């Protein structure tokens, strides 16, 4: 009777000791309890720690501990890290199989899918070259982040459907072991297009195309519209088209980083630098029509380091042009666009940057949480941003009034003159709002037909293009990445047939325009 | 002997004195003449024993095929290197050809040596031009690593060989290859003698390479330029085999027991490296591992110490030399066009370059030991002699042959068949130079089908 509580307490004491040892070995930031060894036993059998470990990831802590140990060992050893070969670790490798120019969401998506589709580990060596790792001017992160299937071109609808499916299951695709899961904040609130009397028939045609492609869209009459969204003023609205599923908006930065993290974990090398030159071989041949053609084959890419005269020529087999708004500069380096006017070499890549403004407004009495991404027939759009009564609004300026693209300065007059009146007339609650912030971003605007260019250029034998998406590149990025990877590794499109978006239409001057209502 | 050696030595002043425009045609013609002259060594092949005898150099049935192979390879290397060195300044091109020629000189002296120390010195001397070729003209940063592996593996293996040879000289009194087979058999009983036995063989096993000490080979082959890969695969590996065949006559009777683990290593290496080949993404790496696989069979054949084993080993060495060099040239034609060694990126080439597919086909079939090519003859003789040594080896060699066939076919189908990616469609057509190169590789192989006695070694 006397021995029992004592041995019980002794057992508790040893158990406590073991627990503290385990915690100390795990290196967790917990409050350690210090049992009093001298003389006594623990006064009570309760745990004295006041905080519990927030997470207990053995492997992550192990890695940090091992890294610290290695650093300590190398600091303790004599000698310096000087080596006779001046190796700059930021330089890209001397050769790679595929160089992706442009580290936006399209570039990283292509990198991820190339690694996903290589059949053995280390099958292809991919590097992604991005000139600005802060992404201060990249279209991806300055985007409004919407995704919709309400296009008229079947290729665009299929691309959006596939991308939405990818993003719904993003952790299956882009989840990395031992890292936090990806949270895209995909608000599936749908898109709402409003059509006036003159353009209602276009909306109906688009609707049938979308339904037959598998998009879940519904048409609403003005009364149904008013019933569903009472905050809309339905004057002038003849028909509305509302996306029921797979439409909405998400966080582009998260998607970019998810692609980047997964691709890097699969072995893609990221390089910060700018592509300033290509080394290429030219072959003069005659086509079947008798025209003289100069076929170029890129042998190496000159990557210039930021703020430095250092450069590294990267010898490569394939170059992917995913440079977005700045894609035309790359083709100029290869002499495309500077040939005689009626030859293929005289047709430049029709992609240029176009500045678009996005304004964040705060309206406490605005539409509620189920607000879709609304686009009026005047071109003005807005969507909800967050849960605090903030909204994002914008519109495309007229062709004649395109803003200057040398900088990303915002013109606040634009909001006052072009956006607010239409917005306030469509949604009366927006008569009282305050512009809290604004930014500007570039569209990689395809001046030919405002749709993406995917595929190879006829004159450059090993450059693949994935650019010119004119504002809907972000939402198509997963599917575009997969298609380009199929082109490179399988030789042909296998899941989606995007041959309609190839270079052929530009050479044949047959634009594939979206039949928009705006 | 001198009728080949002097022209080869004079090739060096020739490269430095020729006008730049005529550099490559001149050296090509010169080396082709040397190659044709070297064929005269094959004339006395029907007699066993030494021909072209001099105090320092001689040829016999074992070294003649290897000498002819060496001389034949120089024009092929010059043909293959023409394109990728075209962009360099002329003096660097001259340096390159000089290095290849000096390799040739060292190899002729090595294979023709009558004394083992001379063979050893030449064996080591070939390392230097090779190192220079790999580290200076290789393509990637990894070439430095490859050079280090190559140098130190070989040196570490051959230092014990030097000690062992000096000990042998001390006990036998001579190291002349002409008389060593007739020397009194050595009393090899102690543990030190066993170490001596291992020391004699280690350098050659590393050079062959034996699986286990083969790590330098994929690196060196992949990082070397095409001529470096060719000479490595075709001749330098065979230096190890030739050395083993010469030295093994004094190593009796220990070899009967001590060769056991090495034969097992070699056969296991055949299977392991064959399996690695099936998973390779890099074309040159695949061919390098297939070299290790074939050489594993050669090591097994030599260590059985039977006439069939030796003959099979010699035949396989010659045939493999021609085939492997041909495959490296083919891989280089791919590389020069697509600038990538990755197999995934250069597929379906039959559509774009159908004539090159013919050469790929013949080379792949030779690699998988299709009858009636000498590859099969060599493999069959080795497999038979190993079977005689132990029945169980048949499992390993059988599976090894199967895997060899599958990776050779895999290589052929991956590069030639299948859908052709868009960036491969507009490649340069095959040059006549490349066709000539492939023909000069595979024509001797096909001719050897008709008179294999030339490469049978001592049992002719």
Image (spheres, rainbow, N blue to C red):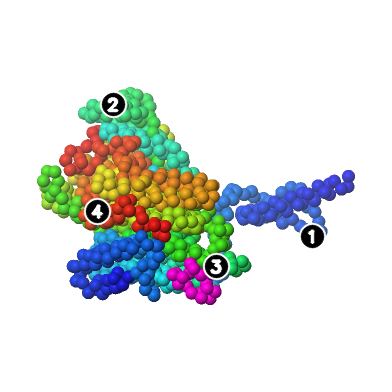
Q: Secondary structure at mark 3?
A: loop
Q: Which residue is mark 4?
A: B435
Q: Find residue A235 and report its horizontal and vertical position in percent.
A: 28, 29
Q: Chain of mark 1?
A: A
Is A57 positioned to the left or the right of B14 in the image? Answer: right
SS class, disc 4: helix
Instruction: Write down the chain letter for disc 2.
Output: A
Spatial CA span between label 2 and label 1: 84 Å
Image coordinates for residue A280, horizontal then vertical, percent: 24, 57
Residue identifier under label 2: A208
Q: Is residue A354 visible in the rendered structure shown here?
A: no
* Viewport quadrant of the N terminus of chain A: top right
Is disc 3 in the same subunit as disc 1? no
For the residues labelled 3 and 1, the Cα–Cα distance comes to: 79 Å
Residue A151 lies in the magenta-colored region: no
| Residue identifier under label 1 | A38
Q: CA distance from mark 4 to mark 1?
A: 89 Å
Q: Quadrant of residue B196?
A: bottom right
Residue B177 in magenta stretch = yes
Are dots 2 and 1 in contact, CB under 8 Å? no
Q: What is the magenta range?
A: B168-185
* Depth order, front residue of B272/B122: B122
């Amino acid at each position: 009777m006397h021995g029992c509580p004592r041995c019980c307490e002794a057992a508790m004491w040893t158990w406590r000791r073991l627990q503290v040892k385990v915690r100390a070995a795990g290196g967790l930031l917990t409050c350690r309890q210090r049992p009093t060894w001298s003389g006594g036993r623990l006064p009570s059998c309760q745990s004295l720690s006041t905080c519990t470990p927030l997470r207990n990831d053995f492997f992550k802590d192990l890695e940090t501990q091992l890294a610290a140990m290695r650093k300590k060992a190398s600091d303790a050893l004599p000698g310096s890290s000087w080596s006779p070969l001046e190796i700059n670790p930021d330089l890209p490798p001397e050769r790679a199989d595929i160089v992706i120019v442009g580290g936006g969401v399209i570039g990283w998506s292509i990198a991820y899918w190339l690694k996903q589709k290589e059949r053995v580990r280390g099958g292809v060596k991919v590097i992604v070259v991005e000139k600005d790792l802060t992404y201060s001017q990249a279209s991806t992160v300055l985007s409004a982040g919407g995704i919709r299937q309400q296009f008229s071109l079947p290729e665009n609808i299929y691309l959006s459907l596939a991308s939405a499916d990818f993003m719904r299951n993003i952790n299956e695709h882009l989840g990395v072991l031992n890292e936090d899961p990806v949270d895209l904040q995909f608000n599936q609130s749908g898109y709402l297009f409003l059509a006036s009397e003159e353009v209602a028939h276009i909306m109906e045609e688009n609707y049938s195309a979308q339904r037959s492609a598998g998009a879940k869209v519904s048409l609403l009459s003005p009364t149904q519209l008013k019933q569903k969204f009472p905050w809309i003023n339905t004057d002038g609205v003849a028909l509305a088209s509302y996306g029921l599923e797979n439409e909405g908006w998400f966080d582009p930065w998260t998607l970019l980083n998810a692609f980047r993290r997964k691709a890097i974990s699969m072995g893609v090398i990221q390089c910060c630098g700018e592509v300033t030159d290509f080394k290429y071989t030219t072959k003069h041949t005659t086509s079947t029509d008798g025209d003289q053609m100069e076929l170029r084959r890129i042998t190496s890419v000159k990557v210039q380091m930021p703020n430095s005269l250092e450069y590294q020529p990267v010898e490569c087999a394939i170059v992917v042009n995913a440079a977005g708004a700045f894609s035309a500069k790359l083709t100029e380096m290869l002499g495309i666009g500077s040939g005689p006017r009626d030859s293929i070499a005289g047709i430049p890549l029709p992609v240029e940057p176009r500045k678009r403004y996005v304004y964040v407004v705060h309206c406490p009495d605005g539409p509620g949480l189920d607000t879709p991404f609304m686009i009026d027939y005047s071109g003005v759009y807005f969507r909800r941003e967050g849960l605090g009564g903030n909204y994002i609004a914008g519109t495309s300026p007229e062709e004649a009034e395109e803003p200057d693209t040398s900088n990303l300065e915002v013109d606040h007059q634009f909001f006052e003159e072009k956006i607010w009146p239409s917005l306030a007339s469509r949604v009366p609650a927006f008569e009282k709002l305050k512009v809290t912030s604004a930014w500007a971003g570039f569209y990689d605007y395809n001046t030919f037909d405002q749709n993406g260019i995917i595929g190879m250029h006829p004159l450059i034998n090993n450059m693949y293009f994935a650019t010119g998406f004119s504002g809907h590149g972000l939402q198509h990025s997963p599917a575009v990445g997969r298609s380009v990877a199929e082109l490179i590794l399988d030789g042909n499109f296998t899941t989606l047939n995007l041959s309609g978006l190839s270079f052929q239409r530009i050479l044949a001057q047959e634009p594939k325009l979206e039949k928009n209502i705006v | 002997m001198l009728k080949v050696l002097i022209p080869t030595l004079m090739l060096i002043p020739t490269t430095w004195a020729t006008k730049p425009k005529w550099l490559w045609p001149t050296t090509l013609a010169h080396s082709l003449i040397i190659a044709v002259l070297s064929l005269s060594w094959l004339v006395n092949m029907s007699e066993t024993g030494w021909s072209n005898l001099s105090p320092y150099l001689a040829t016999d049935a074992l070294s003649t095929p290897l000498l002819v192979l060496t001389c034949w390879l120089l024009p092929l290397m010059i043909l293959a290197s023409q394109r990728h060195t075209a962009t360099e300044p002329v003096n660097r091109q001259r340096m390159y050809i000089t290095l290849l020629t000096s390799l040739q000189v060292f190899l002729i002296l090595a294979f023709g040596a009558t004394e083992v120390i001379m063979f050893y010195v030449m064996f080591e001397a070939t390392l230097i031009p090779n190192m220079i070729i790999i580290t200076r003209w290789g393509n990637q940063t990894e070439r430095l690593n490859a050079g280090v592996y190559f140098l130190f593996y070989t040196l570490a293996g051959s230092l014990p060989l030097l000690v062992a040879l000096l000990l042998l000289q001390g006990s036998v009194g001579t190291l002349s290859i002409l008389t060593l087979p007739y020397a009194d058999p050595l009393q090899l009983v102690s543990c030190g003698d066993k170490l001596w036995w291992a020391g004699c063989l280690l350098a050659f096993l590393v050079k062959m390479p034996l699986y286990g000490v083969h790590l330098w080979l994929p690196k060196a082959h992949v990082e070397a330029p095409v001529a470096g890969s060719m000479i490595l695969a075709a001749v330098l590996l065979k230096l190890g085999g030739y050395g083993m065949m010469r030295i093994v006559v004094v190593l009796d009777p220990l070899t009967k027991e001590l060769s056991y683990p090495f034969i097992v290593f070699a056969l296991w290496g055949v299977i392991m490296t064959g399996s690695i080949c099936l998973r390779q993404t890099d074309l040159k790496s695949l061919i390098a591992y297939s070299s290790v696989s074939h050489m594993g069979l050669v090591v097994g054949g030599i260590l059985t110490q039977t006439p069939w084993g030796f003959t099979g080993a010699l035949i396989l060495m010659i045939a493999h030399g021609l085939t492997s060099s041909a495959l490296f040239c083919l891989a280089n034609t791919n590389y020069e066009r697509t600038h990538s060694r990755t197999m995934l990126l250069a597929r379906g080439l039959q559509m774009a370059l159908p004539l090159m597919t013919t050469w790929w086909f013949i080379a792949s079939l030779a690699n998988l030991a299709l009858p009636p090519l000498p590859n099969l003859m060599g493999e069959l003789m080795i497999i038979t002699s190993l079977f005689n040594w132990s029945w169980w080896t048949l499992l390993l060699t059988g599976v090894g042959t199967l895997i060899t066939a599958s990776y050779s076919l895999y290589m052929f189908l991956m590069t030639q068949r299948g859908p052709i990616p868009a960036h491969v469609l507009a490649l340069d057509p095959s040059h006549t130079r490349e066709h000539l190169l492939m023909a000069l590789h595979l024509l001797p192989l096909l001719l050897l089908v008709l008179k294999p006695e030339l490469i049978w070694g001592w049992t002719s």
